[in-house]
Image: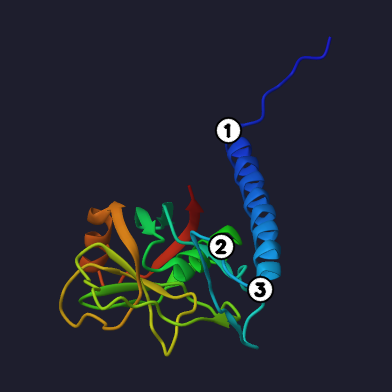
């Protein structure tokens, strides 16, 4: 009699993420189609404009971004793990784009090319689209803040705030580090040590 052998935990987790991505995509397609026929974004969604550019291969996310709730993100680097909470309320298009790129593994095995006295910037590479910053006028860049790099618009680059000297202005705040600030401090204390993202996991 053939015995059932359970799948290894890491494979089970991978399948769960794949199923979650497919479900989100299916729901987004349904809502997007309904909204297009209605010529308006439904409640709790914002219609985002992602402009394609010729310097990347990643397709933009669907234009409708949820405006409520938070997203848990785990960023594993070769120096340690940072756990983030992204808030959709003030920056739904930016959070929608970040999760889209993370689910496509865009950030996996990429360097964090910039470390200053204030920030660690990651997200090297060009996604193939850009979008406008989402600024409320109430932005604060405290230690542990996570924000998008504003290079004439938002793309894939983002940064962690670890200090207050020379902070960038007019950057879209997408969330905060909830676990792993000591890791960020160790990285900031060793500016000559390169930092690399292993992977970015959603949920």
Q: Nearer the viewer, residue 72 or 189?
A: 72
Residue 185, x across and y down, in percent: 22, 61
Which tag, 1 or 3, sits closer to the chain's start? 1
Q: Secondary structure at mark 2?
A: loop
Q: Secondary structure at mark 3?
A: loop
User: Which numbered circle lies on residue 42?
Assistant: 2
Which quadrant, please, contains the N terminus? top right
Please give the name of the residue rendered at 42% of the width and 52% of the height, measured from the top-left corner: 69
Query: In the image as oriented, which residue stretches furthest toward the top?
Result: 1
Left or right: residue 35 compared with residue 135: right
Q: Which residue is mark 1?
A: 9
Q: Mark 2 or mark 3, which is nearer the start of the sequence? A: 2
Where residue 2 sits, quadrant-wise, is top right
User: Which residue is tagged 3?
Assistant: 59
**For the residue labelled by badge 1, is the local secondary structure a helix, a strand or a loop?**
helix
Q: Is residue 45 left or right of residue 5?
A: left
Cα distance in 3D space between marks 1 and 2 = 38 Å
Q: Nearer the viewer, mark 3 or mark 2?
A: 2
């Amino acid at each position: 009699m053939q015995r059932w052998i359970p799948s290894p935990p890491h494979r089970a987790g991978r399948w769960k993420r794949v199923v979650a991505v497919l479900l989100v995509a299916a729901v987004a397609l349904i809502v997007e189609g309904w909204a297009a026929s209605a010529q308006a974004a439904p409640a709790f969604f914002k219609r985002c404009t992602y402009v394609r550019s010729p310097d990347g291969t990643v397709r933009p996310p669907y234009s409708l971004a949820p405006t409520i709730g938070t997203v848990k993100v785990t960023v594993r680097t070769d120096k340690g793990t940072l756990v983030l909470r992204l808030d959709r309320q003030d920056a739904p298009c930016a959070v929608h784009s970040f999760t889209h790129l993370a689910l496509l593994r865009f950030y996996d095995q990429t360097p964090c090319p910039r470390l200053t006295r204030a920030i660690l910037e990651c997200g090297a590479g060009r996604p193939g689209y850009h979008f406008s910053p989402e600024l409320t006028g109430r932005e604060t860049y405290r230690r542990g803040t996570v924000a998008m790099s504003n290079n004439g618009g938002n793309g894939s680059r983002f940064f962690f705030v670890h200090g207050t000297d020379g902070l960038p202005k007019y950057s879209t705040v997408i969330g905060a580090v909830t676990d792993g600030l000591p890791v960020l401090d160790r990285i900031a204390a060793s500016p000559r040590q390169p930092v690399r993202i292993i992977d970015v996991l959603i949920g």
